[in-house]
Image (cartoon, grey):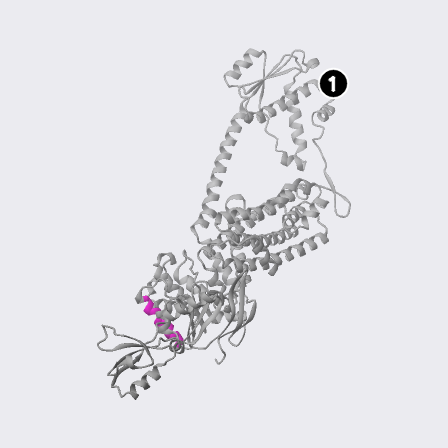
Amino acid sequence: MTEVPIRVDRVSKRFDKTIALDDVSIEIHQGEIFGLLGPNGAGKTTLIRTVLDIIKPDSGRVEIFGRPFRPEDRDRLGYLPEERGLYPREEVGAVLEYLGCLKGLTAATARAETTHWLARFDLADAAKKKVEQLSKGNQQKLQIAATLLARPDVAILDEPLSGLDPMSARTVNAVIRDCAAAGQTMVLSTHQMGMVEALCTRVLMIAHGRAVLYGSLKDIKREHSSHAVRVLSSARYEACPLVARVDRPSFDGQAVDVHLLETATSDEFLAWLVAHQATVERFERLSTPLEDIFVGVAERAVGIA
Amino acid sequence: MNKVLLIARWEFITTVTRRAYIFAVIAMPLFYGGMIALGGVAGRSASTTAGRIPTAIVDRAHVLNLAAAQEQASRRDRDAAADPLAAFANPAAPTPVVEYGDLDTALAALRARTVATVFVLDADYVTSGGLAVYTRDASVFSQQADRQRQAQIVDAIRVGLLQPLLGRDALARAYAPAARVRRLRLNAAGAAEPITDAAGLGPFAGSLGVILILTMSVFFSAGFLVQATIEDRQSRMIEILFSSVDPQQLVMGKILGLGGAGLLQVAIYVGLVIVPGATLLALFQISLAKLALSLAYCAIAYLLFACLMMWTGMIGRTSQESAQMSALWMLAAASPLFFMANIGAAPNGWVARTLSFVPLTSPVTMMLRVASTDVPAADIVVTLVIGIAAIYGALRGAARIFRAAALMYGKRPTLPEVVRWLRAA
């Protein structure tokens, strides 16, 4: 499969006076774990629903598997919506088999996949139970199983870890990694930055319907890293014209955090250390946590809006 | 399997296996059937007991001949047996009449409850018409029985007065002038043909029964639809389903599955409580062509109102609100029944035809017309086309509203929003 699973090209969508999506463009590649970030009400769900053809964009183009959406594409797309539930009074196994058949599986395959996924999520003994008899966390795992049951080429998971204990969260993370390794494209819409940092290779951040961050997570983190390095050396940092401030954290031996001027780079600072014949035992760029990047970008977007 | 059929099967199975459905289908008709049977037996017993209590008469005018009156009543009943209308008249069995010589003895019998009513003909009855009636009970519920007793006495007085004046046959005609009625109607070719039970009144009554059964199935199924739609919203399943099927498939699947559940419920009701369908058909000799046409209009009614019910299921915030709104559709569907007398009297008249061409009233009106007479083929074709077009429009509207309203969790769309969605459909 060489086609791009999801391509969104300059899509806009407005609800009355609210702009839900404003000229958003992204490409999501096969086998990647893609993070969709943004504050509440930013337009993430609208973007997902547009991709899934649940709502139509006002302008722009959405391509699924290299062409406009076709009804049969639904069988290749898995979706775990944020507002989700399962038939509470029905048996777990029956519900999964039904949803599998709706995705185009034969009854026999749906039954086999149901058995497989229930076991994968430690719910093998729950097949004959009513959905409402399961705990909230187990219902959540069941919903993820329902999304992945038909092994869709693209799975879009909106807040997949909500309501899960750490053990279950670890299981879900492992499942997501395995699916991506098998060539499935995984799109995660989440506020859990730890999950994004652990799993995603690329991200899109939306704020007020606009794409405010898009690209490789590594590049974004580098781009938004603070102008600070943690250094253990013989140099006198105060003498360096590139340094704005020096902090001495008490917990990290003799290393110090050197904050550089906005105009300076860590490479220039390293070159200065070498030029001044300092003995450098440790030199580490201090990266900004994704959460801080998220908050900073979101606040700037609010300011702009 | 086709996704529509998959959804239909799921909806059907999950509905018919619910305890509430099983209770409604099995236990309720058994309970109500039992109560009706008990009430019928008790009522019949009470009626029989009351019917056995004689009527007393004190004939101060000396005009009565009770034996002759009894003979005339028997002759009238024999003659009337051939009249199809008489089969529906169901006259009450006559009560015994006992003549008393004086009022005091008759009133003593009334006090002792050995007679139910005392009629007293005044001595100058022939000139004055004076007649007194004594009874123990003057409630609303006893008036019907009193009227029947009075009619019986009046018939006896008529025989007594006329017997000396008329011959045997003239007396019989005066006693029951319309006992031997031949009823005819003009058929489609304009020729007169006799109305028998099988060709006239029976089929109408039978078709009316079928209409009621079919209408019941429409309302039961529509009720399931509203309930299922609300449950899907509450359980937040709709968006998950939308990722697998398009809204039209979802709407059609639900309509078929829940329609089947409603039809099964009615079939079981008919089988359990009313009478097996085959007996009903045989009893009233319903024309199979008319039955097929009625079924076609029933299917149109169901599909049309099912789509409309889904609108209300999606628009209401709660099940109560949706049920209240869906009552409007129920009222619209059943509104031709308010014109039943008019439609029955002139099945091809302007009222009937106008109602036939309005999509909401068309199916039930046409079922009534088909039951009443031979409807012109053009009317049948036009109403079927109108029905199918209305279903198509309602289905598209339902799918559109379903898609749009389903994603508005906890919010009720405004009327302008609904209108906008419908226009976009």
Determine whether, in the image, residue A91 is placed left or right of residue B361. left
Q: Position of residue B145 (x, y in %)?
A: 57, 26
Q: Which residues are magenta?
A: A168-180
Q: Does residue A32 appear anywhere in the picture?
A: yes
Is any part of residue B373 visible from this angle? no
Q: Position of residue B181 (x, y in %)?
A: 71, 34
Pinpoint the chain carrying mark 1: B
Q: Amino acid at mark 1?
A: Leu
* A157, B387: nearer the viewer: A157
Instruction: Count numbered badges in the picture.
Output: 1
Nearer to me, A190 or B264: A190
Task: Name the residue carrying label 1.
Answer: B165
Whether residue A193 is situated above or below residue B195 in the rendered picture: below
* Quadrant assignment for the C terminus of chain B: bottom right
Considering the numbered disc 1 on the image, is that residue within a helix, a strand or a loop?
loop
Crowding at mark 1 (Cα within 10 Å: few <14, some 14-19, many 20+): few
When asked about the image quadrant of residue B208, the answer is top right
- Which secondary structure dominates the residues rendered in magenta? helix
Which corner quadrant of the image does residue A217 belong to?
A: bottom left
Q: Is residue B170 magenta?
A: no
